[in-house]
Amino acid sequence: MKPLLINGEWVTTSHGMDNVNPSDVSDIVAVYAQAGRAEAESAIAAAAQAAPDWGLTTPQQRHDILHAAGNEILARKAELGALLAREEGKVLPEAIGEVNRAGQIFLFFAGEALRQRGDRIDSVRPGVGIEVTREPVGVVGIIAPWNFPIAIPAWKIAPALCYGNTVVFKPAELVPGCAWALTDILHRAGVPNGALNLVMGPGSVVGQTMLDDPRVDAISFTGSQATGARVAAASLPHMRKIQLEMGGKNPLVVLDDADLEIAVHAALDGAFFSTGQRCTASSRLIVDEGIHDRFVAALADRITALNVGHALSEDTQIGPVVDPTQLAQDEDYIATARAQGGVLRAGGERVRRETEGYFLRPALITETEPLMRINREEVFGPVASVIRVRGYDEALSVANDSEFGLSAGICTTSLKYASDFKRKSQAGMVMVNLPTAGVDYHVPFGGRKSSSYGAREQGSYAAEFFTTVKTAYTCA
Ligand code: UN1
């Protein structure tokens, strides 16, 4: 059984959970220890105890640890990519790409540790000087989702440690493998005892213990809207800092003047790669009437030709859905969309392969209206809907008509429309002639409206969440 890490010790428990391969349910990756309330509390206590010393380490010490971890992740990307593909179902090239991203994130924050600086400002009063500096927040609880098993933990843990915080890390129950490997790498890279703790286990136990404990100073969460709301409500009584990344219903606008090949590729990649299981997925395709039929026909052909199958097979382009619950949800949304008048134009059927896995051909649903459920709620699977519009103004207004505001894209050859869309889109991230998903690791990530709450993740903007500002006055 793979153990928890608490206060620098590997700890086994009486409960273990199987990590099942969604491409082949007879393949168990490994068994992972499950923390109960007691283990979660020990992890929080250890993080609280380690916080003062870790917060006072030199930038060089933090740089060296993050740098060593980043280098090891990059050196092992083929092996870790295979583990990721096996436990989550992302195809191997995407999985290796994600591991690469995680490694780069650690190298970026290794550099950030050396670039921390403050401001020196003259007071409005004579003889008084002011220094503005950043300090660690303290103990950070990290609650990660299953869809990016190594990159999301990396982009939360790396800045947390970089800016001098200690961490209690709860990975998603479906993907303990990458979480364990990452923790092992950081532990061996020299993170001191208690500064990083790994507690696998259910949200209702481990997550809840973190929410209830006043020693947890901040929580960075990525996951569903419903759980995000619980994190927020439970954190308010503690006046705890929170950073929430939740859902999306990301629009990809295709105007009549778009390059058809670019638009079809942006939709195919944005909606269906990573089996559509990205909060940034291009799930609402908003298509101008002049290009609509050509776009839909070309996209449907590409969907039909996609090779859906085992994530580790060389010719697979789309891996399995992550688990039976998610598969049932995807199929429910397809059925509801059809019942409300949508037309299933391509895909949407289960695919049989040699191994038993959760294989679903990506679904394209046309003739949908903005108010249908398929255009309001996040599916989190390989399901995209098409809304036909007349011209740019209608496209913009349909794109913004959502409770979400994570990412938005437009395919056009017009500088005028591209510029206007970048300005008026009510999303945190805007893409021109690109899929809405697939972001860089060194720039801010996050959205508006119900998609996100709190400061941005990633890049140097991560300092907003993972530090607190101090203004110090001196009268000489
Ligand atoms: C990406 O699109 O490259 O959970 C990243 C998610 C997002 C990350 C998406 N937080 O899907």
Image: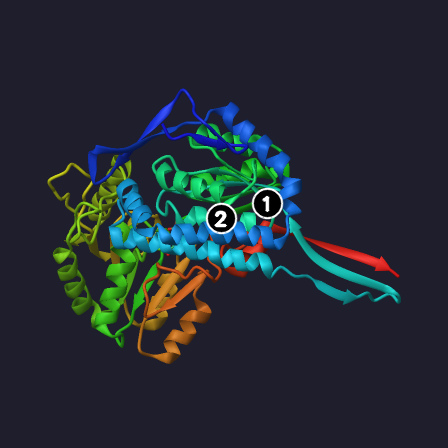
Is there CB contact under 8 Å for labels 1 and 2?
no
Quarter of the picture containing the N terminus is: top left
Residue appearing at x 30%, y 47% in the figure: 79
Residue 403 place in picture, x, y as percent: 42, 52
Q: In this rendering, would 126 be left or right of 407?
A: right
Residue appearing at x 55%, y 32% in the figure: 7
User: What kind of residue is marked 1?
Assistant: Asn
Q: Nearer the viewer, residue 153 or 416?
A: 153
Q: Residue furthest top?
A: 14
Query: Mark 2 — residue?
Result: 156
How many neighbours does mark 1 have within 10 angstroms: few (below 14), some (14-19), or many (20 or more)? many
Query: Mark 1 — residue?
Result: 165
Q: How many marks?
A: 2
Residue 436 place in picture, x, y as percent: 35, 61
Residue appearing at x 12%, y 56% in the figure: 304
Mark 2 within 8 Å of ligand 1, using the beta carbon = no
Please identify the quarter of the rendering in which residue 269 is found: bottom left
Which color scheme did the rendering employ for the protein? rainbow
Q: Can residue 388 be seen from the camera position used here?
A: no
Q: Nearer the viewer, residue 57 or 43?
A: 57
User: What kind of residue is marked 2?
Assistant: Lys
Rounded to the nearest whole Å, what is the CA distance between mark 1 and mark 2?
A: 11 Å
Q: Can residue 222 be seen from the camera position used here?
A: yes
Q: Is residue 431 above or below residue 209?
A: below
Identify the element where label 2 is drawn: helix
Q: Is residue 468 above or below residue 130?
A: above
Quarter of the picture containing the C terminus is: bottom right
